[in-house]
Amino acid sequence: MQPELFPYSDISFEEFIIFLKKNKTSLQMDINMQIRLESNLSKEEQSIIEFLESSFLKTLTEPNENKSQTDLDTLLTTWIQTYSMILDYHYLHLFHLMLEKAFVNILKNSTDVKAYSYMFYLSTIATKTSNLFSNWKNTNKITDDFLSHSSQSLLLSYLELFPIQQVFLVQHQKNTNPSIFGWGRTEQETIQRIAFYPLVDINSAHLNELSGHSLSFKVGESSIFLYPITTLEKEQEETIKNYLSRFNVFASNNAQYEKTLLNKFKVLDELNKVLISYSGSNDFIKIVKGCEELLNYSRCVFYAYIPWSNEFKGVIGEELAKVQKTQGYVYPNQLFHTMLITKKPIFIKNPVHTVKNETIELFNLSSLIVAPICHSEEVLGWVTLDQEGKEFDCTQEDLQLIEEVCNRIGLFLKNFEHNVSPSNNIELTDRELSVLTLLADGYDNKKMGEFLHLSEHTIRDYISSLMLKLNAKNRTQVVSSGFRLGLIT
């Protein structure tokens, strides 16, 4: 391709999408090839990058009834939010690199006069994605309630260096009943630190008088009054003003961090109480319900994962008939595949690209969180959390809390499983236990043989052995005895 024959020209977002749709299959194949050629990538890295590339192309190109009203920034933000627990700067860099290499391979033999334009537009997307991802990672909810103990101490330790007799901090000043805190030096004029204390006997007249005779500074939505106004020189005033500007950012972030941490501890403490109060897997439905309440979601559904067949099955949740109708194979769904690899919760802002249409319609899904329940390296299943049709947002902190909750549930399930004591001394081999578990899932001899790589005749022998050990007359009694004795849960 000769550069002078294909000059650069501006293209629209719609033109770029059309190019992607026309070349999607070739791009996907070339991306996968580029990933395999990177010998320094681990299998996990290859799998995650492959999934990110595939999901990215789907987000931009697959039909969506609202796509015509959706701009590039919205689509990129949706993609980033959906895979925020998988994405980090390392994977984002590799994602851009593989995509760029695939574009070069496709465009180098292209006869399209806008080939260079597509390449430049890809650079624009890479820049936008990086910026949006940085904003997503660094977003903090600024709050006015920043009077944590550490922030108080830091503020007072600095202000005590100046000839200030009293400090007043007024929150919600425009309200009828503002919150007013005070601090003053001791009579001995020592620098002993006395934390802010609430002033309850000050009225509007006092507050107006205070405002007129103090040096005031704005800190977020609050005001700090330094009394009296005449004790500070102009240079000192400017120094304090600069300090308070920096302090405002620190205090707001610090308060948000402490608030998030406190909320996390409260939720985990309540979860521990829930787990301790229940005796085992038969109470798991109550634990799932507890997750709804503790995490403030309208619906929580638990899906069991069957590793030897790579299947999942709906087990527990509201509208049980619907839940138990939901089942299938993990593959080729790359979302579930990636979740099993990373063992991290995934927030799905818009499920149209990752969840079957019939499932979306069945549960009236909008935004969704899918969180694996794990113990060590074993995935036991996952829960989905949603607001029953209402779209919502989710922060990194929310996902980290959900991950911790699910890990504790996984530990609870495994501990209960290990602590089950059968009512008699029945011991099953690993193979017998596998056959018993598959029996409980409703598989016939042929299917069990395929999963376990055994002949149907050998499967029949194992079932006969189970009937003998469990004193059962048929397959149904085998399963019933397995549950009753705690051999399967």
Image (cartoon, rainbow, N blue to C red):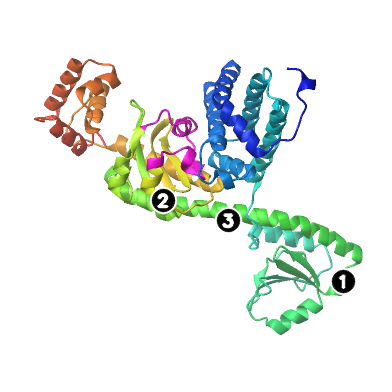
Q: What residue type is labelled 3?
A: Lys
SS assignment at label 2 = helix
Q: Position of residue 193 (x, y in %)?
A: 72, 64
Of callouts 1 and 3, the N-terminal one: 1
* Residue to which mark 3 is pinned: 259
Q: Which amino acid does label 1 sit on?
A: Thr
Classed neighbour count for the residue bearing mark 3: other residues with Cα under 10 Å, few (<14), some (14–19), many (≥20):
some
- Whether residue 344 sits left or right of residue 216 in the image: it is left
What residue is at 73 percent from the left and 60 percent from the top?
155
Q: For residue 271, which numbered disc appears in the image? A: 2
Question: Please, which residue is most extreme toward the bottom here?
Answer: 205
Q: Quadrant of the N terminus?
A: top right
What residue is at 80 percent from the left and 57 percent from the top?
243
Cα gap from disc 1 to disc 2, whole angstroms? 53 Å
Classed neighbour count for the residue bearing mark 1: other residues with Cα under 10 Å, few (<14), some (14–19), many (≥20):
some
Of callouts 1 and 2, the N-terminal one: 1
In depth, the one of 400 and 149 nearer the eye is 400
Q: Where is residue 326 in the image (x, y as percent from the top left)?
A: 33, 40
Query: Would residue 69 be visible to someone looking at this image?
Result: yes
Point out the stretch of residues depicted in magenta.
329-358
What residue is at 52 percent from the left and 54 percent from the top?
263
